[in-house]
Image: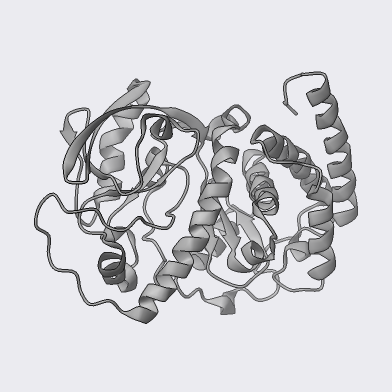
Amino acid sequence: MKMPIFRQLTAAASFLLVACATPLPKPAEPAAAPVAAAPAVDNKARETLQILITLQERLDRVSAPLLVNNADLCKRQARKLLGFSAKNKHSFSAELADTAQSAFGFDERLRVTNVVAGSGAAQVGVRRGDILVAAEGQALPQGENAERNAATLLGPLVNKRTSVQLIVMRDGATVNLDVPLTLSCAFSIELGNADLVNAYADGRRIVVARGLVAFTHNDEELAYVIAREMSHNILGHAVKQKMSATMVGIIDNLIRVRPDLGTMTGTAGIKPWPAELDAVADRLSLYLIARAGYPIDSAPQFWRRLAEQHPITEVNGYTAIHPGTTLRLMALDKAIAEIRAKQAARRPLTP
């Protein structure tokens, strides 16, 4: 059986801490208590995990301002979050768990792996590498189901409060933090482990394939991709296209260490998006981008370059399932003028 890069947990476990996946871990901090000796490092597995984690870290960094600054546009998908993600060795697939421990210092305890810029966690100094000890006086779980169990514990706390009292272990000493909760779009942004130049959204998750990440020249261009898929989720396009189940299956496959690309023939069962739906998503995506602080002017050039270098005839390519390039570019140009006018008049950036 092919295993996911990171174990597939419940949506609650993914979203309560942060709506992003795992970035590059910090080297291990000194343990507060003796732990089992780490297994020997498998260099090939370490290299594989390092590449995957580094790419995911870029997705996390780029997506953070899009998620945090657009909560009021995410409608029903906004949630109060702590503003960080945490993993232990069991968060990784079985074939990579030993490498996660030996190469990156993960053990049974939940360790902070990413802090979202602009979040309450970032404001009060939660750090990558902090070991989670307790929340509101309750010990945080360890072991195989730690993420899921932590989500179960934190859920009621998050819903009732504006902040959470957190105890972490840092450099062998305990640190007490009062973490303000951050309202954020609760989408998980995940790496698709394939060289496809494509991205997919199933309503709650977004996956950007490795090939499309590589195609982007800079973080600004990657933000264009993430924002478009966020727009599809916000607008409920997978449901309107009756493609939710298909998208779920594709994302489940692509986040595995070794996806089954034999199932990705043709358009993998995805109906090409109607140009009108795509144009609406393009317009909303530019608002998401502008509100996140990214420049919007280069968006048409990026999508034009993508359509030219990966045309509609390329199976499993982005343009094959988003073929309405002409109407999309017109919508982008119109949205740019609209947003510039609102910025000049100091009017709210709401579509």
* 327, above or below 235, in the image: below
Residue 256 visible (yes or no): no
Q: Quadrant of residue 159?
A: top left
Asked if residue 74 lies left or right of residue 126, the reply is: right
Q: Quadrant of residue 44?
A: bottom left
Which of these two is toward me, 92 or 33?
Answer: 33
Q: What is the basis of the colouring in this image?
A: one colour
Residue in the picture at 46% in, 40% down: 116
Position in image of residue 40 (x %, y %): 23, 77
Residue 201 visible (yes or no): yes
Residue in the picture at 16% in, 46% down: 172
Query: Which part of the image, by quadrant, shows the N terminus?
Result: bottom left
Position in image of residue 218 (x %, y %): 67, 56
Asked if residue 239 lies left or right of residue 191, the reply is: right
Report the number of discs.
0
Which of these two is toward me, 234 or 240?
Answer: 234
Which of these two is toward me, 202 or 333?
Answer: 333
* 47, above or below 303, in the image: below
Name the outermost residue toward the front: 171
Query: Which part of the image, by quadrant, shows the C terminus?
Result: top right
Position in image of residue 322 (x %, y %): 77, 58
Q: Quadrant of residue 302?
A: bottom right
